[in-house]
Image (tube, helix red, strand yellow):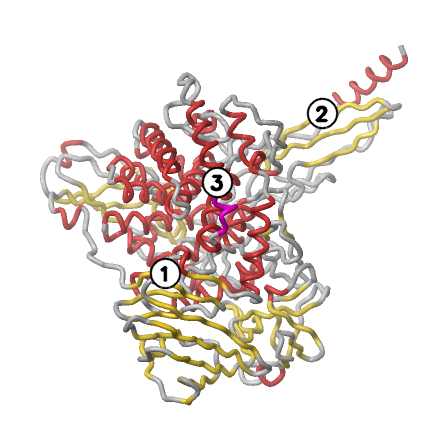
Amino acid sequence: MLVNSVEKLMNIDIERIYLGNLSTVEADISLPERGENGTIFSWQSSHDYLLSKEGKVSRPHFGAGNRQVTLTLTATNQGITKIKTFNANILEKEYPFTINSVYPITVYTKIGKLPDLPSFVVAYNNLNEDIVILVEWENVEPSMVEREGKFIVNGIVKDNVKSMATVVVTNNENQLNPKLNMKKLVQAYNIKDVNLLPHSDFYNQQQRLLQCLLNTDDESMLFNFRKAAGLSTNGASPMTGWDAPECKLKGHTTGHYLSALALCYGSTGNEKIKDKLNYMVDELYICQGEMAKYPEKHAPGFLSGYGEEQFDLLEEYTTYPTIWAPYYTLHKIMAGLRDCYIIGENSKALIILKDIGLWVYNRLSKLTKAQRDKMWAMYIAGEYGGMNEVLADLYVITNDERYLEASKYFDNDKLYLPMKMNIDALGNLHANQHIPQIVGCMKQFEATKEKERFEIVDAFWNFVTENHIYSIGGTGETEMFKPAKQIAKFISEKTAESCASYNMLKITGMLYEYYSDSKYMDYYEMTVTNHILSSGDTSAPTGGSTYFMPLNPGAQKYFSVSENSCCHGTGLENHFKYGEYIYAKLENSLLVNLFIPSELKANDADVELITKISETSFDITVKVNDLNGKVLKIRKPIWASNIIVKENGLQIETVEQDGYFIFEIENGTVELLCNCNGYLLKCIDDEKTASICWGPYVLAAISEQSEFFTFNINDETVGRKLLHDGNLNFTMEGIKFLPLNRIYKENYHVYVKLK
């Protein structure tokens, strides 16, 4: 009787809790600590940074979308405990702007075909920003496209501001689909031909990840797929974090794991890794076959760590977190299978991949462009990773037009339109939701030679690297691009998402292959050395990786492992990609781009690259064993204050061209003795906020201080005041500095203030 009485009183206390309108939360919530009948309340939040257990609300920034948070109440009274959950919808912050004007657009359409008007236009607001905004167009009648000519279509955006599209009706193929006959100039050497040499920081990170993959339980990686297929999980432990059975993104890490196995095998040749790769593919083939036995649940070809329900809900425009980016997860699986086929030389992976690709084509071909546009514009729910990339790859591999058409189903007006117009409207876009789309756009150009696709990629890379990157090469804050040329304003603990740099390096490498301009390798070196190399756990082979790279004063790295986040997934791959672009071919030349100790053993070249660091120099030696008649070109380091060049021990005068030193040498050694001083990388929006650098390294001051350090230095004096012991330990005014990649869990400062 006493228990029943206490429970009744508890139920009354719980029922009397009123938290306000949880469907539109804009302000802090008062969370009661005790009921009238003595029941004690404690609270937990699913997203503490949005809604804390004390009821403090931090609304998502504009562009992130409204966010769902689950508050869990634990009620206790006289030893009895009851649990109740409350769902709160945290409204995103309003973006305080008005539209001044909308940029006009021109759309080409074929005679007899209604124009594909974009769902978004680019506008200029009262804050002097270019932004992307939804538009509603007036109807276009079929009679308007019956003959060649032009007409105007009017539209309306926010605040009833008018927009205008000029529609050109023509059968001129050069206007409808102009081509760009641009060929690759550079061919990077296969990672199978490149071996990292021991004892460098790059080699050590690669070896840790090799051990991590060898230690990884394949059965756990298969858990969600076997469960989704109705197969026994063989007693395996389920995965955790974003791949936990209750999580809606489960399966994505397994896709990254497939890519990591393929890259690891390519980079190291480890046969145990190849065995794991083959086993994973064999088991996924079984899972796909089992799913095909139940067509009422899964359409033919489908494979994932869950059923098709999230794809169904996406087509109903269901928002995150009710669903969580189903095509993003699918891309990771497909990309992993592609890598297992191309790098891992597993033919069964292609069989699985082709069937998934047809499943995508069959599903999306039933939707209209307007439906797809609306899906892809949705924050996180519509995130699709690089689906356009892997489908374009499938087209190139198979020559099946359905894969190319499916790839184009992922065209995203919200991103592509401003790039076509050469306007930087990236501010407030989710950075790594959109960077992989540009990777895919480049793959589509390679498949089609469509001019506008190359121009989109070109504009995007220039905008990001000129207007949106931190000194370490990373971009984005709280996962979002900020308005152009605003860096110092957004130095926080949530800067530079690691997987954003992973994808920026892909774009950089692909553009470099077409331009052969050393500036692409300058950015590549900055990012791979100071962000990617810095992102991995250096304590043990855990596979831990930073999600964000904190750049705030007194920052500290956090290496996620069990969370199985997106950056943990790309982190499994990153450290096997160091061999990419160290060496490349350009006509009859061998290019040396990155100064990572390594050897190239290819059928047309045999060279070795080593580095040596002293108090005042970063020296590079290239030992040439065989070039097969090629000219040697070594990228000129932009961070060197003075370079002495030697060939076979003798100092020489060299020829420079397009950022490279040129050597005609059949065998022997070439040395670049690079004198190094400290130098500053200043924020584009505040020259009094800067990073202190030496050689290719961004340095970080070691300190728990939570305020910026201020130094009385400038471009001329920093080199004299920064002292180096020859082993990458630096001091300035008694404060210790280290390259960011050599910092584990010490508190650090990447940016300082200048007097």
Q: Nearer the viewer, mark 2 or mark 1?
A: 1
Q: Residue at x 85, y 12 (%)?
A: 4
Q: Looking at the rendered structure, which numbered label has been put on residue 112?
A: none
Mark 2 element type? strand
Q: Is residue 553 left or right of residue 476?
A: right
Residue 47 position (above or below residue 436): above
Q: What amino acid does circle 1 point to?
A: Tyr
Mark 1 element type? loop
Q: Which residue is mark 2?
A: 84
Q: Is residue 528 visible?
A: yes
Q: Is residue 285 left or right of residue 401?
A: right
For marks 2 and 1, the one nearer the N-term is 2
Label 3, label 2: how far apart the Cα atoms are: 36 Å
- Looking at the image, the residue that sits furthest to the left is 147
Q: Which residue is mark 3?
A: 255
Mark 3 element type? helix
